[in-house]
Amino acid sequence: MLQLLRHTVIMEIAKVEDPNSSNVCIGLTGDRGRGVFARRKILRDEVIERSPVIVIPDLEWAGMQETVLSNYVFDWGENEEHAAVALGYVSIYNHSYTPNAELSECLEDGIIEVTAIRDIEPNEEIFVNYNGEPDDRDELWFNVVENGQRTNS
């Protein structure tokens, strides 16, 4: 009986449609490596993705800051005292100083939302500004690629 019940639960879970996969997919870009692309037209103000995060407490994060993971985590917490690893596609979105989407941290829910700030066409790459605000042009920790050109801001 337990075996049958277990099989039924697994079958029910397998039937759940991932809303993220109907909106976006991972693809290769010409100059940025991997990126996230729209599978369909996404309208301005539409939530593209809601991704849960794994919070890394500040004391644990201190020992991991020199790892490759540091390029994929987000500051997290009321005072950005922790780090967070976003599940889903959130850590794969590329940066642009002229993004078509933005990230919102929902601390109470333990998620990061990606929302379109303009209409995005099918197969168009989706960009966010890693500084948080779409128009923030502060320098980042890497050379930014904009329109095929590398720049620091």
Image: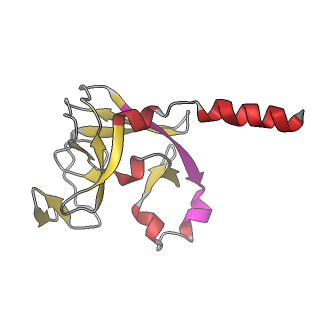
Per the image, is 100 magenta? no
Name the quadrant containing residue 39.
top left
Which residue is found at the position 51% from the left and 52% from the top? 84
The N terminus: image quadrant = top right
Dominant secondary structure, magenta:
strand
| Viewer can see residue 102 | yes
Is 4 displayed left or right of 19 in the figure?
Answer: right
Per the image, is 56 magenta? yes
Which residue is found at the position 82% from the left and 32% from the top? 5
Is 67 displayed left or right of 35 in the figure?
Answer: right
Which residue is found at the position 28% from the left and 44% from the top? 37
User: Which region is colored magenta?
Assistant: 48-61
Q: Where is residue 3 in the image (x, y as percent from the top left)?
A: 85, 38
Q: Position of residue 75 (x, y in %)?
A: 45, 52
Is 122 displayed left or right of 57 in the figure?
Answer: left
Which residue is found at the position 61% from the left and 63% from the top? 59
